[in-house]
Every structure is written in structure tokens, then in C-alpha cells.
Image (cartoon, grey):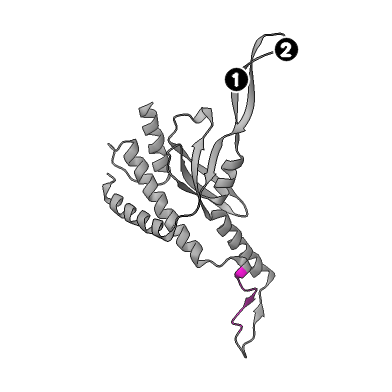
């Protein structure tokens, strides 16, 4: 089982383009993945902070200053703004706890989840399972995992007293939504990342 876990998490690191020492174990590679995704999360938060939501964005081009002409946005420009806003909302990060309930994935350290559409593009994220630690997921992935079901089988007794196997659908993931990190917690996380950055090898 240990070897299969190591092979599995190596494959996840390879898919994310993360370099690791050939003798690194599961925990070190998982730390490398966590650092990579936390850095990605910080970049996403920074990028999101610079984007105004569409409801606050101007529907005109130019400055609404006295004596200056303001030109309304064209339909194509408005649609481009709407697309950018939809993408921003789909990628907004949700802090949560993740428990995998799918029996077929028992023992998995996690997996890369990819969700997307022609309109929004593709969002890809490594989702760790059962770590007991909070994690950040893009909203589009959080929503997809919240709706995903899986089958579980159980023993039952039929009408004539015969034992039989039945199945039922359950939620594949238990997702607990948490409050966002405070500015102080974000600073602590940045310090933790800086301390851990030199320890992957």
C-alpha cells in the first residue's frame, strides 16, 4: 500500500510539474505539492483583488470627468467583461475541509480534479483527501465535488428471506465550508511557507 501511495502522489506531482528528489517519501512530496498550490492560491487571491466585480465595473469607456465624453461599451466589450467576471467567480477560492467518502478511493492521498466548460475554461487542482487540515478549492471545483455521488453496496434480505446485495447513492465527498483566513492568519501562512520552502528535497 505504501508503494502504491508513493507512486500515486509522484504521478500527481509530475502532473503539476513539481520537481522532487528521487528518494523523497510521500510526506515530502505532499509538502511540495501543498507549497506549490498555496503559492498558486496566493497568486490567485492577488489577481482576484485587482479585478473589480462586473457589478462595480463601469459600463462605459473613458473617464466620467467634467468636460470629457464617455463612450458606452460595445456588446462585444460587455460580453468580454462578463466572461472575465464569470471566470473570476468560478475561480474564487473557498476554504474547506475535505473528506472522501468514495470506497473505491480508500487509501488515496488525493487526486487532481479538472473541471471546466467552453465558456469558463478549465480549472485544475490537486485535492488532498482526509488530511484533517483546511484547504482552498476554486468555487467551480467545490461545487462539482459537493454534487458528486458514488455507489456503495450493502447486504440486505429480500422478500423471501434470501440474502442479496443492494446499492445506494451517497455523497462522494463531505465538504465543510470554513470562514476565509484573516489577514493575520494569511501572514502566518506566508511565514510558514517561507520556512518550509527550503526543506523540500
The quadrant of the picture occupied by the C terminus is: top left
Q: Earlier in the sequence, mark 2 or mark 1?
A: 1
**Count of numbered badges drawn on the protein:** 2
Residue depicted at 49% across the width and 54% down the height = 180
Image quadrant in which the N terminus is located: top left
Q: Quadrant of residue 64?
A: bottom right
Per the image, is 57 magenta?
A: yes
Give the extent of the magenta segment. Answer: 56-64
Q: Position of residue 143 (x, y in %)?
A: 59, 46
Q: Is residue 168 magenta?
A: no
Q: Residue at x 37, y 49 (%)?
A: 35
Instruction: Name the residue nearer the viewer: 125 or 135.
Output: 135
Q: Position of residue 71 (x, y in %)?
A: 66, 80
Left or right: where 75 falls relative to 154: right
Mark 2 nearby-residue class (10 Å; few <14, some 14–19, many ≥20):
few
Residues at marks 2 and 1, CA–CA distance in whole angstroms: 16 Å
Residue 34's place in the image compared with 45, above or below, is above
On the rendered structure, is 78 left or right of 179?
right
Number of the label disc, if any, that sits on residue 159: 2
Give the prevailing secondary structure in the magenta stretch.
Answer: loop
Which residue matches tag 1? Answer: 154
Tell me if mark 1 has few (under 14), some (14-19) or many (20+) residues whose alpha carbon lies within 10 angstroms of its own.
Answer: few
Q: Looking at this view, is 39 or 169 the one in front?
A: 169
With 28 as the anchor, is 90 left or right in this view? right
Amino acid at each position: 500500500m505504501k508503494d502504491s501511495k508513493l507512486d500515486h502522489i509522484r504521478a500527481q506531482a509530475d502532473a503539476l510539474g513539481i520537481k522532487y528528489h528521487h528518494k523523497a517519501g510521500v510526506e515530502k512530496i505532499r509538502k511540495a505539492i501543498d507549497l506549490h498550490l498555496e503559492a498558486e492560491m496566493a497568486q490567485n487571491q492577488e489577481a482576484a483583488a485587482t479585478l473589480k466585480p462586473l457589478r462595480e465595473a463601469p459600463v462605459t469607456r473613458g473617464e466620467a470627468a467634467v468636460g470629457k465624453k464617455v463612450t458606452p461599451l460595445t456588446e462585444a466589450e460587455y460580453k468580454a467583461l462578463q466572461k472575465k467576471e464569470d471566470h473570476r467567480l468560478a475561480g474564487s477560492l473557498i476554504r474547506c475541509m475535505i473528506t472522501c467518502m468514495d470506497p473505491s478511493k480508500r487509501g488515496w492521498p488525493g487526486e487532481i480534479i479538472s473541471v471546466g466548460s467552453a465558456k469558463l475554461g478549465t480549472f485544475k487542482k490537486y485535492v488532498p483527501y482526509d488530511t484533517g487540515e483546511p484547504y482552498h478549492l476554486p468555487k467551480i471545483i467545490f461545487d462539482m465535488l459537493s454534487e458528486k455521488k458514488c455507489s456503495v453496496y450493502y447486504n440486505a434480505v429480500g422478500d423471501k428471506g434470501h440474502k442479496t446485495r443492494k446499492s445506494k447513492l451517497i455523497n462522494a465527498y463531505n465538504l465543510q465550508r470554513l470562514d476565509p483566513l484573516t489577514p493575520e492568519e494569511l501572514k502566518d501562512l506566508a511565514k510558514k511557507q517561507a520556512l518550509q520552502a527550503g526543506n523540500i528535497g
